Image (tube, rainbow, N blue to C red):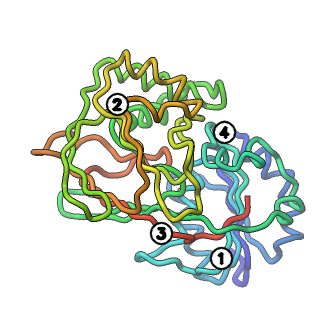
Amino acid sequence: MIQDAKAAIIANPRAGRGKALGLYGPMKPALEDALAPAEFHVTTGPAQATKITQTALKRGASQIAVFGGDGTLNEVVNGFFEEGRLINPDAELLIVMAGTGSDFVRSFPAQAGQKPSVEELLSRPSRFIDIGKANYAASFSARRDHYFTNVFSWGLSSLAGSSANIWSLPALGGGRYAYMIPSLLHGVLFQNQLVRMSIDDGPIEETVINTLSVCNGQFFGGGMRMAPLARLDDGEFDLVLIKDVNLLDLTRQFPKIYRGEHLGHRKIEYQRIRKIEISSVQGRNSNLPLNLDGEMHGTLPVSIEILPSALRIRI
């Protein structure tokens, strides 16, 4: 590492089946010139991007650049925090999305699918976005914080997300089928789940759900427009509950969900929130993992809150 580096550039060679590394290589010389003194890292394993980010920020870096998909971005964003606080509130995150799904960037239509030059990236205006914070059960006695930029989801999406990460299906349709196929296959046997929820410190209610999504951005699952009204900078989540639907209902709704035309369905509820607490009922469904930006972490119970305008980004 460079002792006085003011920037750290992080690339995930596996993201997008090598797409991220393909963008990183040609842009590296220009980044060296524009962000000097800078240090460069190509990750070799899970969670490494988090540690690299934390170390760089503690040593005085004011800019972090990431080349990767939604999972790599999530790792880097978590590296901005330690013990519940931003390590450097003034630091900026530069984002070059190059993953299988790249759902986060879809909320920025002008940037989605682009391959910007370093000069173009640095000339774009920076903006502050909200960040989600999830506090969840990491073991029988321990709880852990994890941050997300895009979407928290639980239910059928837990199984679909886990399988999508393991199966490594071809990135057809911008990653759409890598998520859709596991959703339909797991949907055959999946039992809708009874959970307890408290929204914005309100009363506890029990409800049966298929999928629960707490959305900061609009998209997840390779282009599934779960929250078409969501904004990343409005200080609120968009909560979408797909309730007690059967497989036939879900199959019929899939095309509408990808188009963002599903919110009027009688078994789909939508509201804007700032905080939600979710727990299982009588020990049921405790084995389903939490889907945070497409990565699986912990189990219920979970408490989720929004951190308004928490992170400055350039994308």
Nearer the observer, disc 1 or disc 3? 3
Choose the circle earlier in sequence order: 4 or 3: 4
The residues bearing labels 3 and 2 have C-alpha atoms spaced at a distance of 29 Å
Mark 2 — residue?
267
Query: What amino acid does circle 2 point to?
Result: Lys
Give 216 or 69, whichever is nearer the viewer. Answer: 216
Q: CA distance from mark 4 to mark 3?
A: 29 Å
Quarter of the rendering occupied by the N terminus: bottom right
Can you identify the residue that label 3 sits on? 307
* Whole-number angstrom distance, CA of label 1 to CA of label 2: 42 Å
Q: Residues within 10 Å of mark 1 (few under 14, many from 20)?
A: some
Task: Of the two numbered discs 1 and 2 on the same chain, state the one appearing first in sequence.
Answer: 1
- The number of callouts visible is 4
Indicate which disc, 1 or 4, sits on the residue closer to the N terminus.
4
Q: Give how far across and how far down residue 248 sits, in percent.
A: 37, 15
Q: Please give the residue where the numbered disc 1 appears in the rendered image.
A: 91
- Front-lying residue, 297 or 103: 103
Identify which residue is drawn at 41% across, 44% down. Answer: 270
- Few, some or many C-alpha atoms within 10 Å of disc 2 (few <14, some 14-19, many ≥20)? some
Residue type beneath disc 1: Ala
Q: Secondary structure at mark 4?
A: helix
Q: Position of residue 101 (x, y in %)?
A: 61, 38
Residue at numbered disc 4:
16
Spatial distance from mark 1 to mark 4, Cα to Cα? 26 Å
